[in-house]
Amino acid sequence: MSGSIEVRRLTTPQDLFQAAADEFIRSAAEAVQKRGRFTVALSGGSTPRNLFTLIAANAGNLPWSQMFFFWGDERHVPPTDPDSNYRMANESLLSKVAVPATNIFPVPAELPDAAAAAARYEQTLRKFFATDPGEVPRFDLILLGMGPDGHTASLFPETAALQEKSKLVVDNWVEKLGTSRITFTLPLLNAAGEVVFLVSGTDKAPALHEVLEGSGPTEKYPSKLVKPTDGQSIWFVDRAAASLL
């Protein structure tokens, strides 16, 4: 299957989250039926919280013992920190369902050295997926958001991580935030079977237009660079975000 892009336009944010929850459940069921397990990388930020709440509400429809959770990026903070992507997902989803603790793989962002945390997480991925040297793991599903600046995961415009070709996970210094973030790299994102973007709000409209329809430089809009080479990407966008399309 060659890479494909689909844009699904919903009216309200709640419609968007419900449609994305339905797709998550469908993708999980298909993966377990075909391969006996479902591997997913969750996104952070504020947008996915409502999605996670909806998935938790449908807990009975999911094979939790065969689902394995990772994170596409993480803030360089301990798991108890209010800014932690792991903490948000745990509070809104993982603590509310019957997923075994051994199926959850947080980024070790409590390590004082962000580069060491990234390297350890890459080792965790390689061990779990049992990849050969040079081989890139293939997630069944990677959830992503997009910032008003066009960033996704923690791949921010014109940052060093955009140039990474061999590592799976890196620490990425983000000058405007004054901090390092730990993030999946483009080779890992683009190896996924499915990538789902959630984009909501008028503040995202200019960037969404540029990413999906514009001709500007990709370095300025990293979300443009996420195009699975042998999978699909689905953009769930609400009316406000899609207002310039």
Image (tube, rainbow, N blue to C red):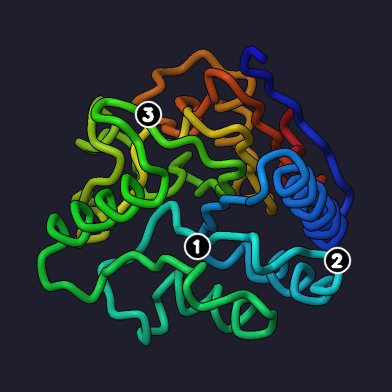
CA distance for labels 1 and 3: 20 Å
- Name the N-terminal-most of marks 1 and 2: 1
- The residue type indicated by label 2 comes to Asn
- Between residue 71 and residue 103, name the one nearer to us: 103
- The residue type indicated by label 3 comes to Pro
Which residue position is annotated with label 2?
Answer: 61
CA distance for labels 1 and 2: 24 Å
Q: Quadrant of the N terminus?
A: top right
Q: Across the whole image, how many numbered discs are drawn on residues?
A: 3
Which residue position is annotated with label 1?
Answer: 44
Residue 163 coordinates in the image, percent (x, y): 24, 27
Residue 244 coordinates in the image, percent (x, y): 72, 32
Which residue position is annotated with label 3?
Answer: 187
- Name the N-terminal-most of marks 1 and 3: 1
Residue 138 coordinates in the image, percent (x, y): 49, 35
Q: Is residue 143 left or right of residue 158?
A: right
What secondary structure is marked by label 3? helix
Residue 96 coordinates in the image, percent (x, y): 68, 84
